[in-house]
Image (cartoon, coloured by chain):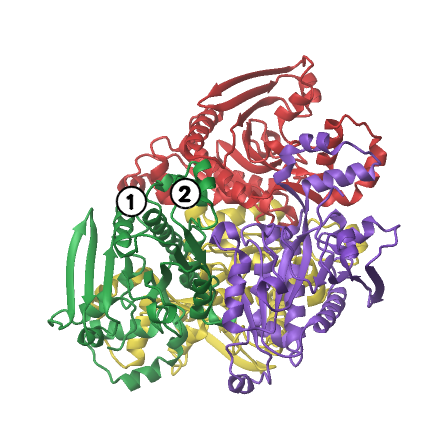
Chain colours: A purple, B green, C yellow, D red
Amino acid sequence: MNFRTDLAIERREYREKETLDGVLSKQKNIDGVKLTTIEIINEKGEKLLSKPKGKYVTLETKSIAQGSDLFSAALGVLSDELKKLLPEKGTVLVAGLGNDDITPDALGPKVMSLLLATRHISSELAENLGLGSLRSVAGITPGVLGKTGIETVEIISGIVKKIKPCCVIAVDALASRNVGRLGTTVQMCDTGVSPGSGVGNRRKGINKETLGVPVIAIGVPTVVDAVTMAFDVFEKAGITLEEKVLMEKLREHKSMMVTPKEVDNLIDRAAHLIAMAINTALQPSLSVQDIMSIVG
Amino acid sequence: MNFRTDLAIERREYREKETLDGVLSKQKNIDGVKLTTIEIINEKGEKLLSKPKGKYVTLETKSIAQGSDLFSAALGVLSDELKKLLPEKGTVLVAGLGNDDITPDALGPKVMSLLLATRHISSELAENLGLGSLRSVAGITPGVLGKTGIETVEIISGIVKKIKPCCVIAVDALASRNVGRLGTTVQMCDTGVSPGSGVGNRRKGINKETLGVPVIAIGVPTVVDAVTMAFDVFEKAGITLEEKVLMEKLREHKSMMVTPKEVDNLIDRAAHLIAMAINTALQPSLSVQDIMSIVG
Amino acid sequence: MNFRTDLAIERREYREKETLDGVLSKQKNIDGVKLTTIEIINEKGEKLLSKPKGKYVTLETKSIAQGSDLFSAALGVLSDELKKLLPEKGTVLVAGLGNDDITPDALGPKVMSLLLATRHISSELAENLGLGSLRSVAGITPGVLGKTGIETVEIISGIVKKIKPCCVIAVDALASRNVGRLGTTVQMCDTGVSPGSGVGNRRKGINKETLGVPVIAIGVPTVVDAVTMAFDVFEKAGITLEEKVLMEKLREHKSMMVTPKEVDNLIDRAAHLIAMAINTALQPSLSVQDIMSIVG
Amino acid sequence: MNFRTDLAIERREYREKETLDGVLSKQKNIDGVKLTTIEIINEKGEKLLSKPKGKYVTLETKSIAQGSDLFSAALGVLSDELKKLLPEKGTVLVAGLGNDDITPDALGPKVMSLLLATRHISSELAENLGLGSLRSVAGITPGVLGKTGIETVEIISGIVKKIKPCCVIAVDALASRNVGRLGTTVQMCDTGVSPGSGVGNRRKGINKETLGVPVIAIGVPTVVDAVTMAFDVFEKAGITLEEKVLMEKLREHKSMMVTPKEVDNLIDRAAHLIAMAINTALQPSLSVQDIMSIVG
């Protein structure tokens, strides 16, 4: 598999003709949104899809960027699926991973700017503001190793020890194999963020082992690696080349990425979708409109 | 004292005709930069200046925004004074306090974007890159309580426990009493950040007691409180009004701030000055130019 | 009158006890929005209010920033009032005045980023896109004299000659006298932009004389001049000081402005309100939602 | 030629083994900067390189992003070459083409934010400010058709008629064929901007015919078209495919672009280089430092 992808669904598709031992998948359609759930149940499945054991929920919609009706449907489905993964009670810590200075990697920080943080609002104050009973939510934008000198997992882990959340939601921009998926797919999983994944290539995993609490990861593919795209077009053209030969030719492409021309826009809309899905999943008593008038 | 200021020098000036018990001050001029050191040595002094015991170094320069020669002088003086306050060895954690979304409060986050973080660079790699021996530096932009739900001190404290720095440098935008000081003064102290100080009004102190390691605070005044300005102009006009009466009239002014028209520019330049002072104080083997070509 | 304001309503209030010859005003309340129309009908009126002859419509709402219901009401009223001032047919040129780099002066440029420009869309294409019949709209962000070296009126006039619009809508941030008006008032008039008005102090008028076509100006006060605020608080305190004496004391305040702490947010919301009022007034066949999915 | 490029040098390279009738080229090395001048002298040359008759100066440097020494050298060479193309006297209008909201297309607008505009500064004032005698410079950021509804050439032409410059300098982000050229090449030519060139694909030419004055275009390649990259890697791999077949497979790639991961940074540095080259070429009496302290 000469390509890089953070999407379980793309790894599954790659082997679509095979029956995969240790991998369960099912699909349904809700309000025009295609929902695929892939479950990796044992080590065989882990090996086959190069992903840790767990549940991967993928939501596909024509485009996050299009039409308000479709957007509402996607938001509803995403919020509902997220609720299923969340513990019922306790403070939730949301972490917006990625680099604010690199447009396609800024998904996580953008989501944070729209998060409704509530941990500091006393229940008394919330009642007085007419917000009713709020679930405790905290948020952090840890930045990236190259700018902080601190591994993302170290920062989050330090805060987890302080505020003891029941779980962490980690938001990150993803890499896909297929340009058609950019900005049209959301992946959510209960296995956290794997080392080497994300646009910025995290060095260490952000998961239950490293943090001590469950980690739900949510992401949207925003880039395709240029080398991956090259391999992909060769494959589509039915051409097999020796990998070593090709890699030599593609040396200059290694630091390149493929993005849609309207990537700035796409990131804004994807961030809006994910932030609102998180906010509504965590505060079921508030409407989208209520939340927007507070955070927006 | 009907005014709000984070500057020890302004509190001192307010009582300039008095001899203050427990307060030592001295002044000198270096390369056209006025340097004032105020030391508060006991509780009497603490009370008189409403500031904790410690050393407050104030650097005044015609304008951070003006002329490159003046800028170089200010940078040299600031870097030298900072070195005197820093422990000789050990990892330094720099924290950029404040709210990125409010221009005059964004000083801390802007400084972080220019910080040379090195903690993740192995000494081997540093040698290979021709950077010689680097001091270990980490950085964090903790955000603000209203957006994270977490007290700034909690975030920093969580990270301090993880990475065990020898000290913390906290950068924050300050409020002054006098509009003439906006963007023309830098204050540095060894007492950390006091509760209620900064543009964004931190709720809890960020200091040796709360973090367990020494905290050096560096700031530049970027706003005057509108109510403070009103009191100040009354005082300048020699008018004394009953405070209660005036506060009633100034109710709408409470959420207002006074800034220079070119505040966006001023913040950029102040951030550049402080970041470079920190970078050069921590990496004496690198030139400003070397550092700029890495971070800029 | 020792204060600077761009609002006809504030000049009127200043003389509220007098009957003003040449000035007609009326007020009404629509859906919780206070609407004041001031008409200056002759030179006497011009002198009394220091504003050119014409119609000044002022909309006051608790806060542009608050609650979505209030926002919808304000949008409806503003759009309706704008329609009354617009010629029925012909291309409309919208100009977003001001300086993008100075937060409270960026209202005009921000509105432009949300404008639905249609002049380049052929009627055929519009039909195919399901947009029906569109009115021709063009937009320009002329920048500021200090950065372009060209007077704003020269730029707009050059484009007016090229595209021959039936009228120009000029959007600009305004200065008010009263901090309570910041972000809570919209002024719309059929007399264009006066020299010396706006946050950035235009040097030349932008109006029918200078452009050859009617100019509708729309603005929101985003700053109070610091010197104006000082005069204002003195007046509120019932104190009269000799102007010369006071001006001497306020020398440093001349380059200062007073803004709400949340000015960045306020500008975003005000820009949204004005842009949507313009878009809906010009394209009555499209809904706010339709327009947002195109421009947003 | 199944690829899109705005660089004359890449069209020349494509036919490097041929002797081209109507195309002259020469190369030299100045201070480590490779300088190639291609002259298209007749219609045969125009056809061969798909570019209008004129002079194309290409500057290649390891990376605009690297090292300050290299940067100074590139700046000097670029400024000198630009001087050769400029009329000796008269107002110069600089136009920053492109879309501020699309990172790799924002080169032009970014250059404008660093332009030293002087047309509005009287010679008296310039003397008083110690700036000596300044050449008259004006600047405009026309925006893009999709947002203004006005063709870029219409806006510039309207202003040209108003201020009658001796020439226009048009700055625009370019597309190259080769990822290795992104951010490492500057092209300058005396033929203006061709229709369909630039990242944003201008619809009409911006040149002497359309504006009535000479147009110097300066640009830096910031993207490779994803389809072009695909063709390019096929070619490098020695594979020939039927174009129709391939285009079908690459349908989804049509709205994709390839950029370096650090494109935000690259744009900032390229904008700095070009702006300073323009500023120093136009104001030979001022140093880079002087100019930076005014515009920066």
Up the image or down, C263 lies above or below A283; here it is above
Element under disc 1: helix
Q: Is B135 left, or right, of D85 in this rendering?
A: left
Q: Earlier in the sequence, mark 1 or mark 2?
A: 1
Q: Is D30 left, or right, of D48 in this rendering?
A: left
Residue B172 x, y percent position in the rendering:
37, 62
Q: Chain of mark 1?
A: B
Q: Quadrant of residue C179?
A: bottom left
Q: Is C204 left, or right, of C228 in this rendering?
A: right
What residue did someone put label 1 on?
A: B72
Q: Quadrant of residue A19?
A: bottom right
Nearer to the camera, A194 or D32: A194
Residue D21 showing in the rendered view: yes
Circle on res. B31: none
- Classed neighbour count for the residue bearing mark 1: other residues with Cα under 10 Å, few (<14), some (14–19), many (≥20): some
What residue did someone put label 2 on?
A: B292
Up the image or down, B163 lies above or below B65; here it is below
What is the three-letter code of the residue carrying label 1? Ser
Q: Is D123 left, or right, of D236 in this rendering?
A: left
Nearer to the camera, A92 or A29: A92
